[in-house]
Amino acid sequence: MCPAGWRNASINRCQALSARWASAATSFVVIFASLSGFLAHVQVAQIDTALLAATALATVAGAALGAWLATERLAASQLKRVIALVLIAVAVKTAWDLL
């Protein structure tokens, strides 16, 4: 039997994550990637504690809002669109910065 959110394929293997599962898995990985980057940065730079506190508060608020939207307010198709738009925005910003 497949875990919740997975589809059972005809070859009896679990495939195709739902949008919520994919978003949760990505978010989980981002936590550790961000933490390792932050710890590496702390070793070589001075950290402004006021900026750090403001960023931490904004991060917690954004995470809570995102979790609420993903679980309570958005359908799977809407969540896919939001994720796509965010990824496109990041790609455009990255390309713009390279010019």
Image (cartoon, helix red, strand yellow):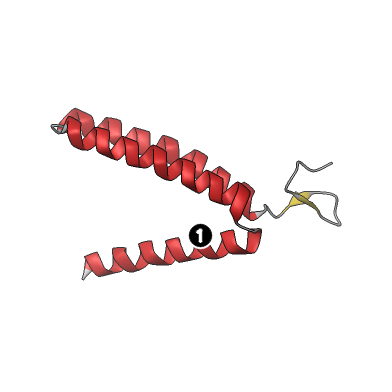
Horizontal and vertical percent position of residue 90: 37, 61
**Which is more toward the observer, 26 or 71?**
71
Residue at 20% of width from left, 37% of height from top? 51
Judge whether 68 appears above or below 43 on screen.
Answer: below
Give the secondary structure at mark 1.
helix
Residue type, numbered disc 1: Ile
Residue 61, x across and y down, in percent: 40, 41
Residue 22 visible: no
> In the drawing, does residue 1 fall left or right of residue 59?
right
- Quarter of the image holding residue 91? bottom left
**Would you say residue 11 is visible in this rendering?**
yes
Q: Residue at x 51, y 62 (%)?
A: 82
88 on left or right of 93: right
Q: Quadrant of the N terminus?
A: top right
Image coordinates of residue 88 in percent, x first then y, are 42, 67
What residue did someone put label 1 on?
Answer: 83
Image point 29% across, 35% down: which residue? 38
**Residue 44: x, y in percent?**
16, 32
User: Would you place residue 80 above or below residue 71 in this image?
Assistant: below
Q: Is residue 48 left or right of residue 80?
A: left
Q: Nearer the viewer, residue 74 or 95?
A: 74
The 10 Å Cα crowd at callout 1, few under 14, some 14 to 19, many 20 or more, is few
Q: Quadrant of the C terminus?
A: bottom left
